[in-house]
Amino acid sequence: MRDDAKEQKAAGVGLAVFSGDYCRGAEVVAALQQDTGYRVVDGQALVAEAARLSGMSPGAIERAFSPRDSVFEKFTHEKGGALAWLRRALAEQLAQPQLLLAGNVVHLLPREISHYLRVCLIAELPFRLQQAMAVENLAETEARRRITAADTAKAHWVQALRGYEDPWAAELYDMLLPMAETGAEEAAALISRQLQRSAVQPTDESRQALADFQLAAQAGVALVEAGHDGEVAARQGRLTVRITRKVLMFNRLQDEVQAVLGELPGVEEVVVAVDPRVPEDRQAEIYRKHHRGTPSKVLLVDDEREFVQTLSERLLFRDVGAAVAHDGQSALEMLIDDEPEVLVLDLKMPGIDGIEVLRRVKKIRPEVEVIILTGHGSEDDRRICLELGALAYLRKPVDIDELEARLQEAHQKVQARRDAGKA
């Protein structure tokens, strides 16, 4: 480790490196780690820590980075919850010095925490295509597709957090390095030298900004745990919560949020307001708080479209969040992409039948609870389904109270496993 890097390590200067795919990002981070001795915190590490703290699955946490919402998002507000836990995990990491943040986590760091040197590594498309084709032996079409998809996801992430459509905008960074002309070792040396700049040394203001971020992260999680969603900012003990939509009975919501956050240590005032970015002409809606004890990731799988849609609406009236799939193949795809907690599954469907869906569900994600709901099953079907791990076997027409009771039982089992994972 060079002497200048040692001095900056002791002084508490941090690093934050954001890179386009196929721009030598991993090589530069590895060289910087060797130069500085800093501990690397990347997206994978932060997702794992956020999942550990929250009990959410890593897949649910990772969806915070994705432009795509889960079909259950309107019931769970899970993406907002994942983001809150990512901030909380980062806030805990920032309590320790000598960090090198890498990847998407860089943009979780408020600009006001100025004792982190922010670096962007990017290159023109021809260079990136060449790198992708050489490193991973990809055809040019596939290389182009991967780069485009990665850039789209990064642009969505940066726009959501920082309001910039261009994730490589120079205003977001202290350094922007063109990696087509810069080798990894050279880039690391350039970055290390910049650590000596007075502009990135810790100040009273930047330390206060860090304390503010840590308080806001704690408040964000408290809000999520209470079933609310909103963007939280802090400034010297004053919390500002921005609600991202117009809601009916706003004063009631405001009172609830202030009661939740006003008890946190270090909080002196809580202000709740509708985000000014919400259009003035947007219609106010009923605000539904997410209840932790209520099933909200139920997937109804049935090819009888009218029946399953009506059932979904009846369950929503009881505050049970349910999405719909009309065939077994769609259900299996949603099992991977959207991570339902409970399946309510018909047996007789075109294509993959219910018993085969149940068998595959228990192989792919055995923790998912499955309730069979059918009008055509036999006693042999019932025995097979229970042997394969179904929680219950119900017949149509179903009593809605009985189905809700079974859904509550399934949800409690899922929640108990999640809580055990957090312990």
Image (tube, rainbow, N blue to C red):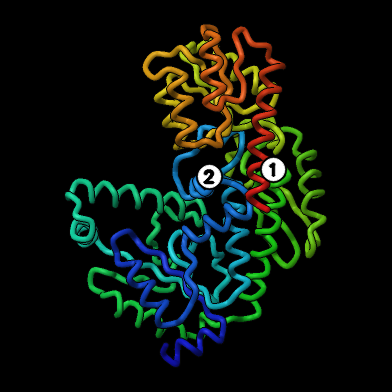
Q: Tell me where residue 42 appears, x and y as whole percent.
A: 47, 63
- Left or right: residue 172 compared with residue 414: left
Disc 1 residue type (three-letter): His
Name the residue rendered at 55%, 17% in the picture.
383
Circle 1 packing at 10 Å, graded few (<14), some (14-19), many (20+), is: many
- Left or right: residue 237 compared with residue 346: right
Determine the secondary structure under disc 1.
Answer: loop
Up/down of 208 relative to 399, above or below: below
Locate residue 173: give its quadrant: bottom left
Q: Check disc 1 and report the residue beneath it.
A: 228
Locate residue 204: give its quadrant: bottom right
Q: Tell me where residue 199 appears, x and y as whole percent.
A: 51, 81
Determine the secondary structure under disc 2.
Answer: helix
Name the residue rendered at 60%, 10% in the picture.
395
Locate residue 24: give its quadrant: bottom left
Q: CA distance from mark 1 to mark 2?
A: 18 Å
Along the line of sight, which residue is nearer the eye, 301 or 258?
301
Up/down of 288 relative to 225, above or below: above
Q: Tell me where residue 205 appears, x and y as whole percent.
A: 64, 76
Which image quadrant: the N terminus? bottom left
Q: Nearer the viewer, mark 1 or mark 2?
A: 2
Q: How many marks?
A: 2
Q: Check disc 2 and report the residue beneath it.
A: 60
Q: Are marks 1 and 2 in contact (CB under 8 Å)?
A: no
Name the residue rendered at 57%, 34% in the picture.
341
Q: Is residue 367 visible?
A: yes
Q: Tell me where residue 317 appears, x and y as whole percent.
A: 68, 21
Q: Is residue 287 visible?
A: no
Disc 2 residue type (three-letter): Ala
Circle 2 packing at 10 Å, graded few (<14), some (14-19), many (20+), is: some
Mark nearer the N terminus (1 vs 2) = 2
